[in-house]
Image (spheres, rainbow, N blue to C red):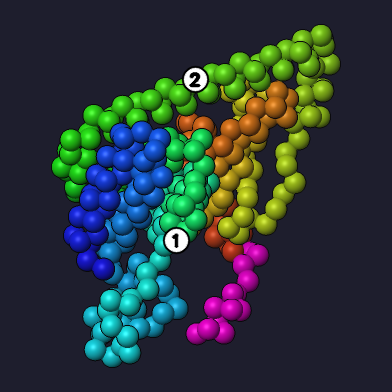
């Protein structure tokens, strides 16, 4: 549960992951598995630096006793302490470092699937190896900054490979985005180029109606946004959250959809559209549909 130990462990696992990745497809199972563990340990290092209890399974009392310095009262040794896994560690850190970490829950899913698939079944999706690996690198980079770890030390002799993989991912993302925009523009032209301006305006107003409203407490929320492909009215869908009452309600987009040209973006593909912004909603409105968690109160 010591952050320094977790940082060291993360670096060792990542060095082994990079070595396996560089050896080619026959070692890619080790690469994705080890990279997932490296990411998990660095996420836990950040949480443990805040407090060791933040990496402990919430319902395991013995583990909480060890994490809070009261292990003398525990009925199990510290070596049996139960900690959270990769997905929960990411979820906890992402709530604190939403703006710093570009990897959301959706983007993390292939990493968790690959790590668990290799660990438990010896299998992984070979088509997603580079995506999994690059996602781990992009997740780790901002954590190194937060933990004040020298990237050159962490990446060691594999720094150039790290830079190459990141640059390749950025270029591939740019090409994919341009392809999606081009396809959406072509669809828009095919659908509406034959219409007169006023007729087109009426049709677009009808087909770009907002999605059905939902409860806004920790659920999806939609904001109007001009489509980057065709300029029509599209909709950003995301979650609302409150970190501090004095900051108000924050909106975090995670998908964009335009009914006029069928453009659909999500995750890192949102680019500048992913920027989190405050919205005009009071805290009373935000918590209007809140209901207590009966299971939580029963456990307590």
Q: Residue at x 47, y 59 (%)?
A: 120
Is residue 262 inside the magenta stretch? no
Q: Is residue 153 left or right of residue 296?
A: left
Q: Is residue 192 left or right of residue 125?
A: right
Is residue 289 inside the magenta stretch? yes
Going from N to C along the chain, the mark reached first, 2 or 1, is 1
Q: Position of residue 78 (x, y in %)?
A: 27, 79
Q: Mark 1 highlights which residue?
A: 88
* Residue neighbourhood size for the residue with mark 1, other residues' Cα within 10 Å, grouped as few (<14), some (14–19), many (≥20): some
Q: Secondary structure at mark 2?
A: helix
The quarter of the picture where the N terminus appears is bottom left
User: Can you see residue 107?
Assistant: yes
Q: Is residue 61 above or below residue 253?
A: below
How far apart are the alpha carbons under marks 2 and 1? Answer: 32 Å
The numbered mark at residue 114 is none
Instruction: Point out the stretch of residues depicted in magenta.
Output: 288-300
């Amino acid at each position: 549960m010591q952050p320094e130990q977790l940082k060291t462990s993360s670096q060792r696992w990542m060095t082994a992951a990079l070595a396996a990745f560089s050896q080619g497809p026959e070692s890619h199972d080790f690469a994705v598995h080890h990279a997932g563990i490296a990411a998990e340990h660095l996420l836990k290092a950040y949480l443990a630096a805040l407090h060791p209890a933040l990496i402990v399974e919430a319902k395991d009392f013995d583990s909480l006793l060890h994490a809070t310095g009261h292990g003398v009262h525990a009925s199990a040794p510290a070596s049996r302490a139960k900690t959270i896994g990769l997905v929960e560690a990411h979820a906890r850190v992402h709530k604190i470092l939403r703006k710093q970490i570009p990897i959301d829950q959706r983007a993390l899913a292939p990493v968790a699937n690959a790590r668990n698939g290799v660990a438990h079944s010896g299998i992984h999706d070979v088509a997603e190896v580079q995506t999994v690996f690059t996602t781990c690198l992009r997740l780790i980079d901002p954590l190194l900054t937060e933990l004040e770890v020298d990237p050159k030390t962490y990446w060691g002799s594999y720094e150039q490979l790290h830079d190459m993989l990141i640059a390749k991912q950025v270029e591939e993302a740019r090409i994919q985005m341009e392809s999606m925009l081009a396809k959406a523009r072509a669809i828009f032209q095919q659908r509406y180029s034959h219409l007169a301006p006023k007729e087109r305006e009426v049709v677009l107003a009808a087909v770009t109606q907002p999605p059905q409203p939902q409860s806004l407490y920790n659920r999806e929320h939609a904001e109007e946004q001009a489509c980057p492909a065709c300029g029509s009215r599209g909709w950003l869908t995301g979650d609302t959250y409150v970190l501090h009452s004095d900051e108000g309600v924050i909106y975090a987009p995670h998908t964009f959809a335009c009914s006029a040209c069928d453009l659909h973006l999500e995750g890192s593909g949102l680019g500048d559209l992913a920027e989190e912004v405050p919205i005009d909603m009071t805290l009373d409105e935000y918590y209007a549909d809140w209901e207590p968690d009966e299971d939580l109160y029963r456990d307590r």
